[in-house]
Image (cartoon, rainbow, N blue to C red):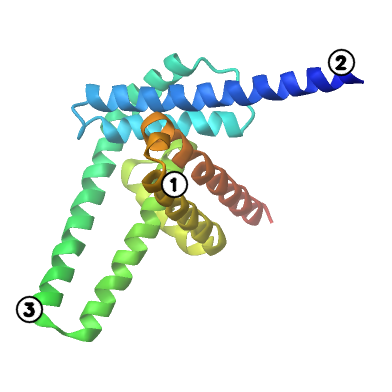
Amino acid sequence: MNVINTRGFAGLFFGVSEWIFRVMYVHLLWVIFTILGLGILGIMPATSAVFSVVRKWLMKEEDISILPFFYKTYKSSWKSSNLIGLVMLLIGGFLYLDIKISQEFLKFAPLHIFLLILSFLFFMTCLYLFPVFSHYNLKPLQYIKQSFLLALSQPLYTISIFLWILCAYIIFIKIPVVYFFMGASILSLPIMWFSLMSFNKLAKKKIQ
């Protein structure tokens, strides 16, 4: 009985240790490939590669060779992910400027509320952007459209993703070492999990 318990504990310890190593390894790859892309041009493909790896894990395809798969995804998504990033940056910048102008100069409450609602929808769309990009094969701008539709059609999962990001932010503030060693992976795992639940629910609705 003691032997079985020892083996069980050893197996659990090995499993947890392996997952911690994987999480830290993928985060390290995210940092390296973001730097290789000079930051601005590297962060979008590196993040999409992280979500693609995490998606494989959650879909029980854990035997992938992480580095070759990460690099392949990074390289193949470089152009399209940066295009999407540029579009979202322009939209976000436009909304930010409009809100500042409305707040400082126009001071017209209905317009300001409308802009805040648009900004909220924009943020909700961003939550699904990387999961959608890693899961579907679409044209660049269709990823934004699909993310927007999912954010509206799956409010429970959208709220869950938002709450996790809030929790992760608090964890990173309170325990910065978590962010420095496994931030990208820790952040992406629950987001991808909730997103896969959302994708499956949407697929079932289409079948019915």
Q: Which residue is mark 3?
A: 105
Q: Which residue is mark 1?
A: 171
Quadrant of residue 108 within the rendered picture = bottom left
Q: What residue is shown at x 21% (from left), y 80% (from top)?
A: 111
Quadrant of residue 193 within the rendered picture = top right
Image position of 118 with respect to 58: above or below: below
Asked if marks 2 and 3 touch (Cβ < 8 Å), the reply is no
Disc on the earlier residue, 1 or 2: 2
Image position of 88 with respect to 50: above or below: below
Residue 128 can be seen in this image: no
Quadrant showing the C terminus: bottom right
Q: Which kind of residue does numbered mark 3 sit on?
A: Phe
- Identify the disc placed on residue 108: none
Q: How far from the left and from the top, in percent, is residue 202?
A: 59, 53
Q: Secondary structure at mark 2?
A: helix
- Identify the disc placed on residue 3: 2
Asked if marks 1 and 2 touch (Cβ < 8 Å), the reply is no
Q: Residue furthest front?
A: 2
